Image: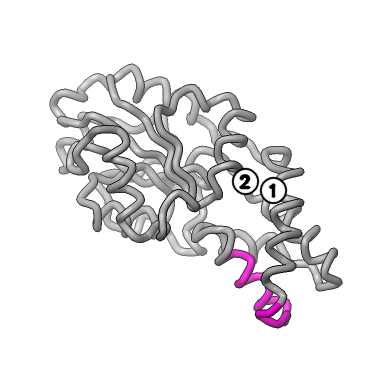
Amino acid sequence: MNAVNALRLDAAIIDLDGTMVDTLGDFVVALNAMLADLALPAVERGFVEHAIGKGSEHLIRRTLAHVGAAPEAFDAAWARYQHHYGLVNGRHAELYPGVAEGLRQLQAAGLKLACLTNKPGAFARALLAAKGIDHFFAVVHGGDAFAVKKPDPLPLLKTCEALGTQPARTLMVGDSSNDAEAAHGAGCPLALVSYGYNHGQPVRALRAHAHVDRLDELDLAALHARA
């Protein structure tokens, strides 16, 4: 992790859900509490795992469609989901192995760090603090920070601006096709973790400079060799 000069990287932008924190349990609990409030049937963990990653609005719309609810139920569902997620945020979530170590290694290599997630910003900041990793990040942008979310490249480009870095010198670290598409569109080098939420698809099938099983296994020198 000490070959940052060879890589010519100045920063790393890191996704949250499925990349740093396993938050599937939070989503399942909050969604099913929301559905119970609306007298709708519960959803299974497997459905939620495939549905998350494109922002809370998308998740709720998919969930309502899955249980056969009318689209008009969205406003009530959104309000109940926000309430319940705020109560459970971080309670059923855990850092993935190697995340804290990997963040320390990236920081020690001289990289500025940002967290960019499709999760609403208030929930993202609270979760980072609850898991004790908020101090690593100079910038935190949630899915409500911009007019569009990942996989659109604009959030990455805006985060690079906030960091004061060029996209080509800013590594994107994520777990899904959303992160991959956004990174390719923004011109950021890309590393993907193998364990997250990629809508039920194998993440190693996605084009990236590196695929790793733990964040602390990310080798910047090897990444440069493949660039």
Query: Which residue is at a point 40% across and 57% down the rendered structure image?
Result: 150
Query: Which residue is at a point 28% across and 40% down the rendered structure image?
Result: 160
Badge 2 is on which residue?
A: 23
Picture layout, residue 169 above or below residue 55 = above
What SS does tag 2 mark? loop
Q: Which of 108 and 96 is in front in this view?
A: 108
On residue 26, the disc is 1
**What stretch of residues is rendered in magenta?**
59-72
Query: Which residue is at a point 64% across and 66% down the rendered structure image?
Result: 60
**The C terminus, quarter of image:** top left
Residue 162, by quadrant, is: top left
110 displayed left or right of 29: left
Q: Nearer the viewer, residue 10 or 175?
A: 10
Question: Is 68 a magenta residue?
Answer: yes
112 displayed left or right of 115: left
Question: Is 224 a magenta residue?
Answer: no
Picture layout, residue 23 above or below residue 47 = above
Instruction: State the separation of the CA atoms marked 1 and 2.
Output: 5 Å
What SS does tag 1 mark? helix
For label 1, the crowd category at 10 Å Cα-Cα, with few meaning under 14, some 14 to 19 and many 20 or more, is: many
On residue 145, the disc is none
How many numbered markers are drawn? 2
The image position of residue 151, as x and y in percent, is 37, 60
For label 2, the crowd category at 10 Å Cα-Cα, with few meaning under 14, some 14 to 19 and many 20 or more, is: many
Picture layout, residue 4 above or below residue 52 = above
Circles 1 and 2, Cβ within 8 Å, touching? The answer is yes
SS majority, magenta: helix
What type is the residue that disc 1 sits on? Asp
